[in-house]
Amino acid sequence: MKSESRIHARDYITRLASAGRYHFSSSEAQGALGVSAAATKLALHRLSKQGLIASPARGFYVIVPPEYHSLGSLPAEQFIPALMKRLGQLYYAGLLSAAQFHGAAHHRPQEFQVMVAKARRPIVCGAVRVGFVVRKNIAFVPTQSFNTPRGTVLVSTPEATAIDLVGYHDHVGGLDQVATILGELAENIDPEKLVAAAETAPVPWAQRLGYLMDQAGADDRTGPLKAYVRNHARSIAVLLPAAPHKNAVRDDDWRLAVNVAVESEL
């Protein structure tokens, strides 16, 4: 009987993969196998022990094809869209992960970074790590789709990525790292779209971004953003709020108190 359960479970995931589907829920598996919840759990556990499936989230499974057996999971960008759809949550790949999609791969992120509307615990599945960062106004952040071997994934646009990198600099290694990535992203940034992205975030993010883009040699892309700051910045922002700023140098273009030195690695 145990052998029959195992064979039926293996047949189930084989049929799914043959149809191009690499994810399923425990309830879907139970329905397909026609056995009890306990028997389904045991069958899925056996497949997991064999490295044929993995579970990034409770009740959610991915099929692990041979090319990813060393990871012990599908790569995050291949299952996050299905997981977030199952959860009914808005998301997009952001920060360092988004920068990679846009060709700024100066530093490979240690985890796949996903922006969400409400807090979620990180995912650890085999060698795959997923970190979640809460983003206000997520429904208005500009995104675009990228193809993956298992479908498509939503990613912040180059302009929205630039805004987020500044707003969440502590998630990407600091302002030096941000300046470096901005230098790589610059050629993909549309100045007008940058303003539209800035409108989804606090104005001080735009003030800091403009200054950092200038420092990264991308000042040819900041004209409309400068006009936006001039019209919307009601006070002087601090480049790095957590650092002392008593003797900060004033940058009038961006209405910014520059209280730390920023160095790009490019």
Image (cartoon, helix red, strand yellow):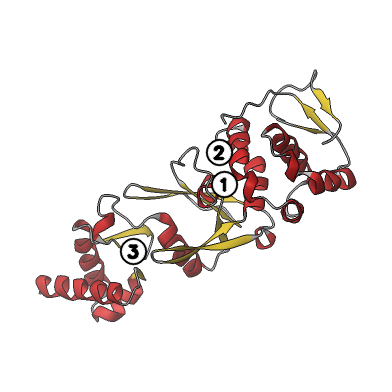
Mark 3 near mark 1, Cβ–Cβ under 8 Å? no
Indicate the amino acid at tag 3. Answer: Val
- Residue type of the residue flagged with mark 2: Val
Q: Earlier in the sequence, mark 3 or mark 1?
A: 3
Of mark 2 and mark 1, the one earlier in the sequence is 1
Q: In the rendered image, which residue does mark 3 sit on? A: 62
Q: How many marks?
A: 3
The answer to whether mark 2 and mark 1 are in CB contact below 8 A is: yes
The quadrant in which residue 251 appears is top right
Judge by depth and name the residue closer to the eye, 76 or 24. Answer: 76
**3D distance between C-alphas at marks 3 and 2:** 28 Å
Residue situated furthest top in the rendering:
247
| Image coordinates for residue 252, horizontal then vertical, percent | 86, 31
Q: Which residue is at a point 21% across and 68% down the rendered structure image?
A: 43
Q: Give the CA separation, mark 2 to mark 1.
A: 7 Å
Q: Amino acid at mark 1?
A: Leu
Secondary structure at numbered mark 3: strand
Instruction: Give coordinates of residue 147: x percent, y percent.
Output: 47, 64
User: Circle 1 sits on which residue?
Assistant: 95
Q: Is residue 150 above or below residue 163?
A: below
Residue 21, label in figure = none
Answer with left or right where residue 247 lies relative to residue 98. right
Q: Residue at x 62, y 56 (%)?
A: 157
Calculate the distance from the C-alpha at mark 3 to the C-alpha at mark 1.
25 Å
Residue at 32% over, 55% down: 73
Q: Which residue is mark 2?
A: 172
